[in-house]
Amino acid sequence: MSLLKVIVLAVIQGLAELLPVSSSAHVVVAEKLMGMDPSSPAMTLLLVLLHTGTMFAVIVYFWNQWKQTFFADSEAFKRFAWQAVIATFFTGVVGEGVIKIIEHTLFRHAPKAQIEDLFSHLEIVAPALLAAGILILIAGLKQGRRPDSEESDQIGFGQAGIIGAVQGLCLPFRGFSRSGATISVGILQGIKKVRVEAFSFALAVIITPLAIGREALRLRHADASGFAHAAAPSLLGMLFSFLAGLLALKWLSTWLERGRWYIFGIYCIVASIVVFALHAKGY
């Protein structure tokens, strides 16, 4: 695994993580363009560790906001904890359910088929980007027409469950932006974008360690010797994605909050067309 390629992928991940444009889809496309196999265990471990780097950047960036909202007092923390448990439960149920359905339908004839086999299929990444773009566009347009007074600063337990379920739908598909989908669903439920954004990234921090463990076990079972070979460059990539994520978060957040959410939907739709074209060319 070339260290230069790892650094390039890490920077792409870090810069795209805050934006609802599916950073993992950008990484997968970049891997394809550089002749790498996104579905290989080493590449999926790299992708997870790149997400880990940006996860730490998110923690550093959002920590003060979380302290003022979710950790302001014992009652606020208790409410957030229950919301996180409910959302993560539905993420697990929906995500694992969709994964099993895909593995037993699309890959039913393949031995030991796994959801990671989808990661190299740009014909699946493209429609996932399109779906995310349409959802973001609808939410952004609706937000633009709704007065601020009609938006809620609180997230209900039922709303948390819906956000978690949508997050579960995002897990199997590179291109269906997790942050874009969860934040958009929150906006459509009438929650203030600042609040649902903080909640969405808090959920990401919760599920990332579980994803790391899953991919680590998968790589060890696939190739025990490959684990040590892939771990070192992946850890380097994690460092660079952390640094790139911090830089992106510092200058992108202000623009993100200016009521232009729909623009990211347009971007995802255009990106899906580009990915379709790349697939047609044989990538």
Image (cartoon, rainbow, N blue to C red):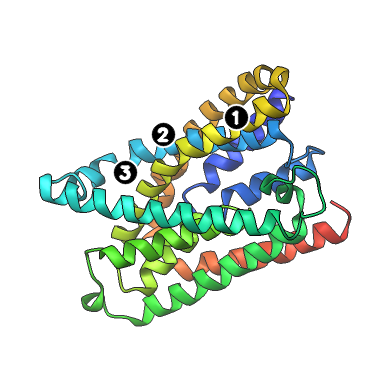
Vertical relation: 229 (above or below) 107 = above
**Quadrant for the N terminus in the image:** top right
Residue receiving disc 3: 62
Image position of 26 (left or right of 51): right
User: First in sequence: mark 3 or mark 2?
Assistant: 2
The residue under the point 32% across, 67% down is 159
Residue 217 is labelled as 1
CA distance for labels 3 and 2: 10 Å
The residue under the point 88% across, 57% down is 281
Give the x, y percent position of residue 132.
57, 66
40 vs 91, nearest the viewer:
91
80 vs 243, nearest the viewer:
80
Residue 61 is labelled as none
Residue receiving disc 2: 56
Vertical relation: 1 (above or below) 118 = above
267 vs 83, nearest the viewer:
83
The residue under the point 51% across, 26% down is 239
Q: Amino acid at mark 3?
A: Phe
Q: Which picture quadrant has residue 140?
A: bottom left
Label 1 near label 2: C-beta < 8 Å? no
Q: Which picture quadrant has residue 207?
A: top left
Q: Secondary structure at mark 1?
A: helix
